[in-house]
């Protein structure tokens, strides 16, 4: 339990497509919008705010806002944002954002995509609870799993 | 919470308390080179962030672990993590299905 890194999330996925193709799917704002489910107002530009609206069913009222950080072609794309900033009435701008990094590596089968989101330590506790409330279902089960995990493996 | 855990003595105290039994300060001080006063201070830090609760039992205080703060952080990360799994799966399908259509 105490070995869990509470500041970052890392994910790896292999995609059977060339790095150039995955790069485009990540950084072309229309393509990004297709799979991320957001309608973006304009292209991603480093140092600039990216705005749009979530298209995920049930969350269409939610605004998308991120600040593009780095765009190193076919290597690294990163932005900062406020994860789960889903209450349209609330101003999240005073909170420390998290950083999302997409790293691309060429592998024999195509592309290895590594995504790291970090900076969760700075997220206020009440925001975390809010995110749970907004998440549809599955949490009772998760809580049971965690409780079991904590009980069985206290260290 | 994170700062509270970023100290070796406090981390050891949490590990001891994670056995599930409420402990007194003297029980918790066993085996540590630091004084009981120092242990008490560490316990108060853990109590202030809600990781530990104490109850008076006669003349001494008993301390036990309160897991809720850790659980909620873990749950939050699980939630964000799950969202990324879904988004990355959509990205993979989006790119790979297009490739399949062309072939």
Image: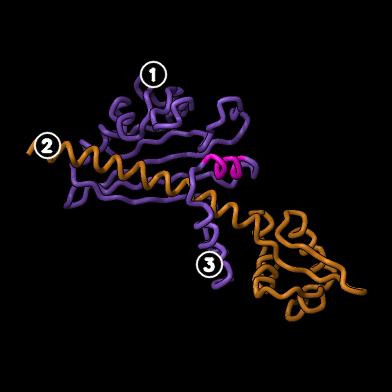
Query: Where is residue A56, by image quadrant?
Result: top left
In the rendered image of the structure, the colour used to display chain B is: orange
In-image side of A84 versus B91 (left or right) = right
Q: Residue B97 falls in which quadrant of the image?
A: top left
Which chain is mark 3 on? A
**Is A83 left, or right, of B100 in this rendering?**
right
Q: Kindly state the secondary structure of the residue where label 3 is placed.
A: helix
Residue nearest the observer in this picture, A134 or A7: A134
Tell which subunit mark 2 falls on. B
Crowd around label 3: few <14 · some 14–19 · many ≥20 (10 Å) = few
Tell me if A65 is positioned left or right of A37 in this view: right
**Comes first in the chain, label 3 or label 1:** 1
- Residue at 67% x, 54% y: name it: B1
**Above or below: residue A114 compared with residue A142:** above
Residue A153 position within the rendered picture, expressed as x and y whole percent measured from the top left: 54, 72
Instruction: Inspect the magenta stretch and tell me whether residue A38 lies in it.
Output: no
Residue at label 3? Answer: A149
Pointer 3 with pointer 2, Cβ within 8 A? no
Residue at 53 percent across and 64 percent down: it is A3
| Mark pair 3, 1: CA separation | 43 Å
Q: Which chain is purple?
A: A
Residue matched to label 1:
A41
Q: CA distance from mark 1 to mark 2?
A: 28 Å
Mark 2 lies on residue: B101
Q: Is residue A76 above or below residue B6?
A: above
Extent of the magenta region = A127-134
Is A128 magenta? The answer is yes
Q: Residues within 10 Å of mark 2 (few under 14, many from 20)?
A: few
SS class of the residue under badge 2? helix
Residue A122 in sight here: no
Question: Which type of secondary structure does the marked residue at label 1 adopt?
Answer: loop
């Amino acid at each position: 339990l105490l070995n869990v890194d509470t500041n970052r999330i890392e994910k790896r996925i292999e995609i059977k497509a060339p790095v150039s193709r995955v790069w485009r799917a990540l950084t072309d704002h229309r393509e990004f919008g297709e799979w991320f489910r957001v309608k973006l107002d304009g292209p991603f530009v480093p140092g600039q705010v990216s705005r749009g609206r979530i298209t995920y069913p049930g969350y269409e009222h939610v605004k998308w806002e991120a600040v593009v950080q780095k765009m190193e072609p076919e290597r690294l794309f990163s932005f900062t944002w406020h994860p789960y900033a889903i209450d349209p009435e609330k101003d999240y701008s005073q909170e420390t954002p998290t950083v999302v990094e997409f790293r691309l590596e060429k592998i024999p089968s195509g592309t290895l995509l590594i995504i790291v989101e970090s900076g969760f330590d700075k997220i206020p506790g009440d925001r975390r609870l809010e995110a749970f409330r907004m998440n549809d279902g599955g949490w009772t089960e998760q809580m049971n799993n965690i409780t079991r995990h904590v009980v069985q493996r206290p260290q | 919470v994170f700062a509270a855990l970023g100290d070796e003595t406090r981390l050891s105290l949490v590990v001891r308390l994670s056995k599930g039994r409420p402990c007194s300060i003297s029980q918790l001080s066993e085996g540590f080179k630091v004084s009981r006063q120092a242990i008490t201070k560490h316990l108060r830090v853990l109590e202030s962030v809600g990781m530990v609760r104490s109850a008076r039992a006669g003349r001494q205080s008993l301390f036990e672990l309160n897991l809720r703060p850790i659980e909620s952080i873990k749950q939050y990360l699980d939630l964000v993590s799950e969202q990324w799994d879904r988004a990355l799966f959509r990205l993979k399908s989006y790119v790979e299905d297009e490739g399949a259509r062309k072939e």
